[in-house]
Structures are given as C-alpha cells and as structure tokens.
Amino acid sequence: MRKIRQHVNPLSAHFMRARAQPVARPPGLAPDCPVEVELGCADAEFSFARAAARPDMLMVGLDIREPCLARNRARAADEGLANLLFGYVNLNVDIDRVFAPASVDRFHLLFPDPWVKKSHHKRRVIEPALVASLAAQLRPGGELHVASDVFDVALEIMATVEDPALAPLGLVNLAGPWGFWRGNPFAEASRREQTTLRRQQRVWRMRYVRNDMAPATGK
C-alpha cells in the first residue's frame, strides 16, 4: 500500500487555490440530523468510530491530502458507513465553501501538526480568520473541540480563540477562561490520542461553545 505523506505545505501554490466543495447530505439521514466535522482528519480513526456509534448523525472528515481522503472513502464504503463523508479542504483557504452558516453542531480539531520549526509556524492551522469561519458555521450552542499533545501549540490555540478581539464571535470556554478540559468527553479517541495516553503523556483539551449555550451531550 502506497505510503501517504504525513506533512504537506498548505501555503504552496497548489493548495492556495480555493477548490473545496460543499458537503451534500446523503439520503437516509434526517434533514435536521446532527452534523460533526473532524478537521484535518488524517486516517480518521475518530471519525470512523464516531460514525459507527451514531448512525443517526452525519460525520464529515476533512483533510488537505487527497490520497488520504480516497483511502478513507474506500474504507467507509467497505464498512457500510453511509453517514460518513470525506472532503478536501485547506482550512485557511476554503473552509467557508464546505458548510452553510449555522449548520454544524461540532467541529473537532484533534492533534494538529505542531510545525515545531520556527520558520514553519506560519503553517499552523489556528488563526483568527479560521476561528471566525468556524464560529460562523456552528449552530447556536455548537462546539469547537480541540486537543493537542504539545502544550505550546495548545496554549497558542487558546490564546487565539480567547483573544478579546474575537469575543464578538461568542465562543465560550466550557472549562472557564484559559482553562483546559480534563479527560475525553467522547467515547471515541483518535489514533494519536490513543498513542499519547499509552505513553502516559498529557492531552491538552479545549471545548468552546458558541453563544454560551449548553452543548450537545457528546454521547
């Protein structure tokens, strides 16, 4: 099986052209069913487990690596998961093209690449424009769920989301300002999270809810 590159440069010319497509809800799901999205899904272990546990919900995995998406689509078909879709996106370029405003119940951003080298920090995912786009696509009460195994990355994400300049977006930290959520509120875990916990390392988790309303149960 051909190996898929773990990292690509999202700032290269090939990826800077907006070409993401809207997600079309598959037949068989209620028009008002919950919608959850894994951003930068990679092998999508979290999405596969979540879709299998919640057949009434639309689960969407988005990634910039199209070979990865093709492999995930084939696996979803093999496993009969009609409620699991995969699509291309460069999060800092064309996420606005994928979902309508106020149509997503929960975004999951799980263990984004840390881009440790200082010269690569500009490739990191979370920036104010992306936070604004995600907030606009969340339904009232919808959630942005973020996890990282790198403290500096988690702290940078928290500083961006909780920047007072973004307060009008209405994203409220469920653990309190500058607080991390302890434990995994979901029954499912990504492959990266499973590896991190096996190594007895810490997962730095944040949960933000739009408009200070109670989130969905996460079950």
Image (cartoon, rainbow, N blue to C red):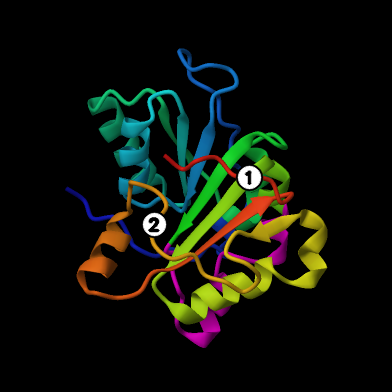
- Label 2 sits on a secondary structure element that is loop
Mark 1 or mark 2, earlier in chain? 2
Q: Is residue 18 visible?
A: no
On the image, which quarter does residue 110 sit in? bottom left
Residue 36's disc number: none
- The amino acid beneath tag 1 is Ala
Q: Residue at x 45, y 81 (%)?
A: 116
User: CA–CA distance between discs 1 and 2?
Assistant: 17 Å
Q: Residue at x 48, y 17 (%)?
A: 29
Classed neighbour count for the residue bearing mark 1: other residues with Cα under 10 Å, few (<14), some (14–19), many (≥20): few
On the image, which quarter does residue 172 sit in? bottom right
Quick check: 203 above or below 91? below
**Magenta-drawn stretch contains 150:** no
Q: Residue at x 61, y 57 (%)?
A: 208
Instruction: Look at mark 1 in the image and give the residue it sits on.
Output: 214
Instruction: Look at mark 2 in the image and give the residue it sits on.
Output: 184
**Residue 133, image x, y percentages:** 70, 51
- Relative to 100, 108 lies left or right: left
Classed neighbour count for the residue bearing mark 2: other residues with Cα under 10 Å, few (<14), some (14–19), many (≥20): few
**Pair 1/2: label in front:** 1
For the magenta stretch, what is the residue range? 111-132
Quick check: 181 above or below 108? below
Name the residue furthest top: 28
Camera-side residue: 20 or 163? Answer: 163
